[in-house]
């Protein structure tokens, strides 16, 4: 796991011990390790779908820019912030290898 700030070139993937359930309003993720659950809707849910396999944060942003009406600087900033939060909760892994 990364100990510093994430960059667009970092590769992320879901942690393996999670259980996720799609519900009408979004997505619920249960971390058995943390004993906590997390709810995601809209773009957070889309990011969760994208990190099923290892993917760079830059590639996540590229996909979101194609699918949503958002400008690159805002997208990159928000995705980095969101992914950093996921990392702090240990529900994703940061990989050094390229996808």
Image: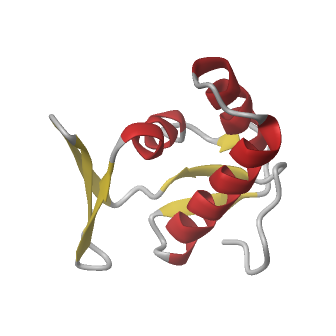
Residue found at x 66% / y 36%? 60
Residue found at x 54% / y 69%? 85
Q: Please, which residue is most extreme toward the left here?
A: 24
Above or below, 12 relative to 6: above
Where does residue 31 sit, x and y in percent of width and height? 29, 67
Where does residue 39 sit, x and y in percent of width and height? 28, 57
Q: In what quadrant of the picture does the C terminus appear?
A: top right
In the displayed structure image, the side of residue 55 where residue 21 appears, left or right: left
In the displayed structure image, the side of residue 89 where residue 18 appears, left or right: left
Q: Quadrant of residue 55?
A: top right
Pick the residue in front: 70 or 28: 70
Residue found at x 78% / y 54%? 10
Pick the residue in front: 51 or 67: 67
Residue found at x 55% / y 37%? 53
- Whether residue 57 is visible: no
Where does residue 38 sit, x and y in percent of width and height? 30, 63
Above or below, 49 relative to 7: above
Pick the residue in front: 72 or 44: 72
In the displayed structure image, the side of residue 72 where residue 16 appears, left or right: left
Q: In what quadrant of the picture does the N terminus appear?
A: bottom right
Above or below, 78 relative to 65: below
Q: Quadrant of residue 45?
A: top left
């Amino acid at each position: 796991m990364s100990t510093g700030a994430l960059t667009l070139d970092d590769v992320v993937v879901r942690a393996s011990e999670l259980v996720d359930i799609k519900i009408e309003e979004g997505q619920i993720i249960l971390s058995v390790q943390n004993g906590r659950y997390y709810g995601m809707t809209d773009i957070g849910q889309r990011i969760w779908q994208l990190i099923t396999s290892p993917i760079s944060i830059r590639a996540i942003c590229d996909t979101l820019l194609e699918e949503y009406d958002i400008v690159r600087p805002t997208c990159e900033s928000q995705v980095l912030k969101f992914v950093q939060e996921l990392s702090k909760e240990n529900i994703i892994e940061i990989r050094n290898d390229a996808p």
